[in-house]
Every structure is written in structure tokens, then in C-alpha cells.
Image (cartoon, rainbow, N blue to C red):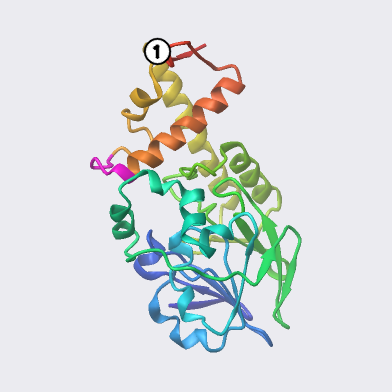
Amino acid sequence: MMQEIRENVWFVEGKNRGKYPYSHSLYLTGENNVIIDTGAGSFFDKLSTATERVVLSHYHRDHVTYNYMFENAHFYMHREDAPGVESEDGFYRLSGLDQVEVETYWKMVKQQAFSATKIDWHLEEGLCLDTGEVNIKVLHLPGHTPGHCGFLVEECGLIFTTDIDLTRFGPWYGNPCSDLEQFRRSIERVRALKPEIVITGHRRPITKNIEQTIDRYKTVIDRRDEAIITALQKHPLTLEQLTDKNIFYPDHYNQAVLRFFEKNMMQKHLESLLKRGMAIKMENDFYEAL
């Protein structure tokens, strides 16, 4: 389904309401049509021949699934994430998924295996992409991934925040290359821009209570910190023991992939707590709250 948000600015709703492993897209029309992210669904056949540029927010498979349908378009992506779509080695290096039973992962994202995309141009902070009718400004919003980008359409106060997705689950930083502190800053930056419309990769357009929605989303990080500290106040625990608490994924059904993500996010919280003097790491690899 496509919904015109403003003239020449279209929200493309992803399959299954954009829930993972699908994502929403943004389509901007003019003399040179632009699609941002291709994870919405296989119905892109009607748009693909009319699209000159495909802009990718980051390398995660749910945002690049249908790249192959845009075979005549030029592809744009931040240089830090480009290796994640250009080669299988690059994807595994950034995602760390070569450390788990990878067949399960490909089934989870409903794909057979990795398929490469050649990036023609690199996105960077402040770059403007003009369709002839709409001007799109690139916002480098790292944390989720190193090259994660959002997109500002100043004429209508709209930001496509992609995987600063404002869902109930909260911020996701489960890859080795993810950065919790960068994510915090990127969320704050979006809030400070005071957008009138926010579109994310996994929610329908948001036009009301935007600041409160952003604050609730960021607060999830604080609640995770509190849950970890509470666990450590009872007695010291190792990283593996904390991972067993399932603070991030309460129901992971013993999936190795989700445990891998859980452990990565736990590690990032522990590093942050150590830096802020809220916990210590003892010689035997146990962590203790201060």
C-alpha cells in the first residue's frame, strides 16, 4: 500500500505492516524518482522501472531485501555500511553472524542466502538528494549500525528515521559493530530536530506526541540498565549468566541467533555501566554493581 504523505512524498507500507523481516519504504517522486529502502515487499515491480536511485539506510537484510528488482537504478549507501551489502564477507564481518548457525538466520529473514548489491555512490552527513520536486537531506545517525542514516525532507518537516524505529521493543544494537552510546546520541539528535512527521522502518507515520514517543523509546535503554543493575545487586554474575536472564528477548525459544544478539547487547550495556562507574568487572570475569 502507498500513502501520499505530502505532494511527491509517499509512504510505502511493508508487508505484514512492516514487521520484521519486512520494513517500510519512502518513495519520493519528481524528475528523478528515489526509493529509500527496499524491504517493503515484492510488489516493487511497478516502481522499479520508474526509479532512478535506490537509497539504503543501512545494511540489514530487512531493508535491502528487494534490491534485485531495481536492476537499472543507481544505489546509494553510507561507506561504513556498504561492505555489508557488497560482499558476503563484509556482511558477516559487520553482523557477526558467521559466529552462529547461519541457516537459521536466513530462514528467520525469509531469504535463501546473501545476495550482493554494488553501491555506486556513498552517502554522507548533509548530502542533499534532489528529485526535482523534493529535496532529501542525509542525516548520519549511527548506533544501530555504523553507517545507519536517516533522511530529512525539510519542506514538510518529515524525518524517515528508518531503524530508530520507535517500536515498543526499543533500540536494537545487537551486532558487534553496533554502538550503544552513538545510538543514544542519534535518538537525541532526532528529538532536537523537532520533526512534524516521523516515519520509521517498522511503524506507520507518526504525527502526534512525537517528543513523548521518542522519549519512551529512549527510556527503554535506561530500563535495561536498571534490570542489569538489579540483577547484579543480588550477586555478581558473568556475561553468560546475565545473558541467561533474557532481559532483551524474554522469549527467544532457545534460538542461537537471538541469544547471540542478546549477548551482544548485554556486553554493550556492561561496557557502558563500567565507563559510568555503575559496575565493576572482577578478575574472575564476574560483574558487580556499585
Residue 228 locus on image (x, y percent): 43, 24
Residue 80 can be seen in this image: yes
- Image: magenta residue range: 251-257
The outermost residue toward the left is 253
- Which of the 4 image quarters holds residue 266? top left
Whether residue 288 is in magenta: the answer is no
Residue 47 locus on image (x, y percent): 50, 85
Residue under the point 46% across and 43% down: 174
Residue under the point 29% across and 55% down: 103
| For residue 194, above or below residue 36 | above
In the rendered image, which residue does mark 1 sit on?
A: 236
The outermost residue toward the front is 89
Q: Which SS type dominates the magenta stretch?
A: loop
| For residue 101, above or below residue 6 | above
Residue 213 locus on image (x, y percent): 53, 48
In the image shown, does 194 or 234 lie closer to the viewer? 234
User: In the shown orientation, is residue 10 left or right of residue 101?
Assistant: right
Q: How many marks?
A: 1
Q: Amino acid at mark 1?
A: Pro
Label 1 SS: loop
Q: Residues within 10 Å of mark 1 (few under 14, many from 20)?
A: some
- From the image, which quarter does the N terminus lie in? bottom left
Residue under the point 43% across and 68% down: 115
Residue under the point 61% across and 22% down: 275
In the image shown, does 258 or 128 lie closer to the viewer? 258
User: In the shown orientation, is residue 120 left or right of residue 47?
Assistant: right
